[in-house]
Amino acid sequence: MCGIVGYIGKKSALPILMEGLKRMEYRGYDSAGIALISNGKLIIRKQKGKVADLENKLLDGEPLPEAHIGMGHTRWATHGEPNDINAHPHIDCRNEIAVVHNGIIENYLALKTKLLQRGHHFVSTTDTEIVAHLIEEIYKSTPNLFEAVRLAMKQVTGTYGLVVLSSHEPDKIVVARMGSPLILGIGEGENIVAADAAAIIEHTRQVVYLGDGEVAELTADNVTIKTLNDVKITKVVDELTFDLEQIEKGGFPHFMLKEIHEQSESIENALRGRLLEEEGNVRLGGLDNVVEKIEHAPRLIFAACGTSWHAALIGEYMLEQYAQIPVEVEYASEFRYRNPILKKDDVVVLISQSGETADTLAALREAKAKGATVIGICNVVGSSIARESDGGVYIHAGPEIGVASTKAFTSQLTVLALLTILLARRKGMTREQGLELVHELKLLPEKVKAILSDTKQIEYIAGEFKEMKNFLYLGRGYNFPVALEGALKLKEISYIHAEGYPAAEMKHGPIALIDEKMPVVCIAPFDRTYDKIMSNIQEVKARRGRVIAIVNDGEKNIGQLADYLISVPPTLDLFSPILSVIPLQLLAYYIAVARGANVDQPRNLAKSVTVE
Ligand code: F6R
């Protein structure tokens, strides 16, 4: 969702801002803009469309004067359609204060009414524009940008990651955060602020994560942070741990394909240092202070969105089967608003790649407010969910840039498997059973490699089915959530309607849809539901449905029924989704590419959904 970058220092600001915006394109957006201050004047350029469109606009126009301070923004529309006027930055009446914003100002109508009465003039239909005018209004009596922003944001309700420039104070950038991430990159003689570490890493590894309700002033040499209540605070400086090449495509045509192919390594990274091979057990240091609570919790509640929610469903199956702990899985967006009953010993587990998803973060806060222990399973180090949890486990998948989540999903499953072993061993699983699980987990990276070593059959099938309008995905047991995930992958990048179902549910309705135009993807590994899903495949074939079956190497029976087979190595039931999802990721990818879709920037989607 919206990208934000701001720079102040000795270098020319514009190239840094443009590069930063490009690095954040993957987050999803529909317009882009920049603001610079040069010779005491604000210069704004903005444009509907891509960063490249903005770049062309800059090249076509008069060259911009040199500037050493500026900010850039990519907007993902919430209030007001994507057009040049609604693009950020937004300015006050006198073109002296400029604002870029990620989030939603909830009381913007009330504030706008007051500002209109005070004679302010608005040009856009955004909620953000009121912030520029509100600061302008306060600045009249408080001519200090830092202070004016702080006072303005005290009047605002909603969420924001905000960056503000004033031509009256061309030596500073003021930023504020409530619910939308902002990271301050601390350089030498320069400072940079961004919504995403990807825009900072080229300039510095030293970062400060701004917290909710904090306001900061950045000059070239200094950073001052205060709370909205005017209390000065000192924060720890963290270090970014990933490399530039991890956020580049490395020879692949799309980030999504690159990340699919990284899965052997990312699963290995999720396991690294965590397996106690002799003991048939695992170590998860981030849970040390809460593991007893989890072990004795009457139930665990998983809350997540999208792909992470699918991972949670699989986690439920794992934990209930092996650790005998009751688990409930909730959509974070429902959990946060439905006043859920939480008992004091309940443990709420938030699963989020980004660690910034607005609904999941709100679910965390709701659970905390009700006294529950909260655990985060996140990818992005230092993200809000990671920081606000009582304990947690990083999945260590490395930066995931592809909008369609792939490697984060398999790494989430790997961590859930580790959590299952940890808890199961504490609750009576024998060493022998633990050894079997740990041993099989260790084999997964090689098995993933084997699947990825030859993807031609999947590419071929994609070509055969690329014109289809609908797809059905069926799975049972551990692979039912994989059916949901396969369908989600296909719809989000290829725009083909797809639905996932527990295979047995087909008879209760969806079977009416089946004919020769309905491809059905059946996930049918050798597991305890094997015979059952084979019957479901028969039912599909009896109605002339075309079946693509994901099976295990060595499969003999399904080949006689299904139209196409994709084979993956066998593994234990609980780990099977980690392997069976990979062909589905590839199928979605190759179908989308065959249809000419822009896989890395699918329409309407944002990578990190920081508004509700
Ligand atoms: C789908 C996808 C989304 C995310 C969802 C949650 O490919 O990426 O469904 O899984 O927006 O995001 P996180 O995991 O960052 O909370």
Image (cartoon, grey):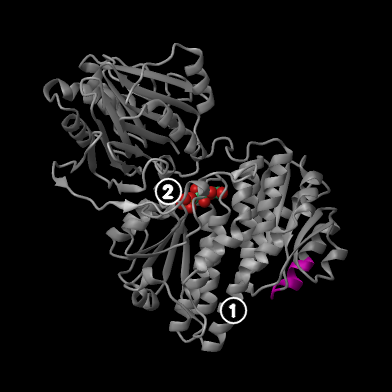
- Other-residue count near label 1 (Cα within 10 Å), few / some / many at <14 / 14–19 / ≥20: some
- Asked whether residue 233 is drawn in magenta, I would say no
Is 211 positioned to the left or the right of 200 in the image?
left
- The kind of secondary structure element at disc 1 is helix
Q: Residue furthest right?
A: 560
Badge 2 amino acid? Thr
**Picture coordinates of residue 336 (x, y %)?**
38, 53
For marks 1 and 2, the one nearer the N-term is 2
- The kind of secondary structure element at disc 2 is loop
Badge 1 amino acid? His
**Picture coordinates of residue 261 (x, y %)?**
63, 54
**Is the shortest distance between ligand 1 and the CB of mark 2 under 8 Å?**
yes
Calculate the distance from the C-alpha at mark 1 to the C-alpha at mark 2.
34 Å
Q: Which circle, 1 or 2, is nearer the viewer? A: 1
Is 435 drawn above or below residue 217 in the view shown? below
Picture residue at 37% right of the left edge, 55% below the top: 385
Image quadrant for the C terminus?
top left
The magenta segment: 527-535
Is 394 positioned to the left or the right of 264 in the image?
left
Is 399 positioned to the left or the right of 70 in the image?
right
**Picture coordinates of residue 24 (x, y %)?**
47, 38
Label drawn at residue 357 = 2
Q: In this figure, which residue is indicated by the disc labeled 1?
A: 439
**Picture coordinates of residue 26 (x, y %)?**
52, 39
- Asked whether residue 530 is drawn in magenta, I would say yes
Q: Residue furthest top?
A: 62
